[in-house]
Image (spheres, rainbow, N blue to C red):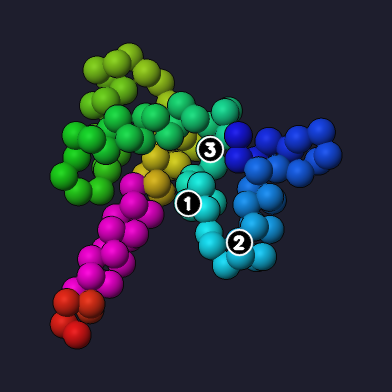
């Protein structure tokens, strides 16, 4: 695990950052997303709902998913899924803009 401390109190992420600092080479694991075990189900639900949406996830999308799978989410979980959807859309937009700018050069 990237953020699980070893017997010396250091994480793999700490080690990889030190290697990056020393060598200038960044390990791709540092770019991965850390999701605590307690919130992993929200992450899974987000991707499950997102896989059936062509745009940002809406509350009706989540409601339909929850009805279908007989799931009840708290307001915090709902808001988290909407926030994740918004962040994903924003990241995709930025990446597209970056690619367009590169093509224009």
Q: Which quarter of the picture shows residue 54?
A: top left
Instruction: Say which element carries label 2.
Output: helix
Disc on the earlier residue, 1 or 3: 1
Q: How much space separates mark 1 and mark 2, taking CA atoms? A: 11 Å
Residue 96 in percent (x, y) is at 23, 66
Label 3: how many Cα within 10 Å (few below 14, some 14–19, many 20+):
few
The residue wearing badge 2 is 20
User: 39 or 97: nearer the eye?
Assistant: 97
Is residue 61 positioned above or below 88 on the image? above
Q: Earlier in the sequence, mark 2 or mark 3?
A: 2
Q: Main secondary structure of the magenta part?
A: helix
Residue 67: percent from the left, percent from the top? 27, 19
- Alpha-carbon neighbours of circle 1 within 10 Å: few (<14), some, or many (≥20)? few
Q: Residue at x 19, y 34 (%)?
A: 52
Which residue lies under the disc numbered 1?
A: 28
Magenta region: 85-100
Which residue was labeled with disc 3? 35
Q: Nearer the viewer, residue 4 or 87?
A: 4
Instruction: Tell me, yes or no, whether the two marked residues, 1 and 3, touch with CB atoms within 8 Å.
Output: no
């Amino acid at each position: 695990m990237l953020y699980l401390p070893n017997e010396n109190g250091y994480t793999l992420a700490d080690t990889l950052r030190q290697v990056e600092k020393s060598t200038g080479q960044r390990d791709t694991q540092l770019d991965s997303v850390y999701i605590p075990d307690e919130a992993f189900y929200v992450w899974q639900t987000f991707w499950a709902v997102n896989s059936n949406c062509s745009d940002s996830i809406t509350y009706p999308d989540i409601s339909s998913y929850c009805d279908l799978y007989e799931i009840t989410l708290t307001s915090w979980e709902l808001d988290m899924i909407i926030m994740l959807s918004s962040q994903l859309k924003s990241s995709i937009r930025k990446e597209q803009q970056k690619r367009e700018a590169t093509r224009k050069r």
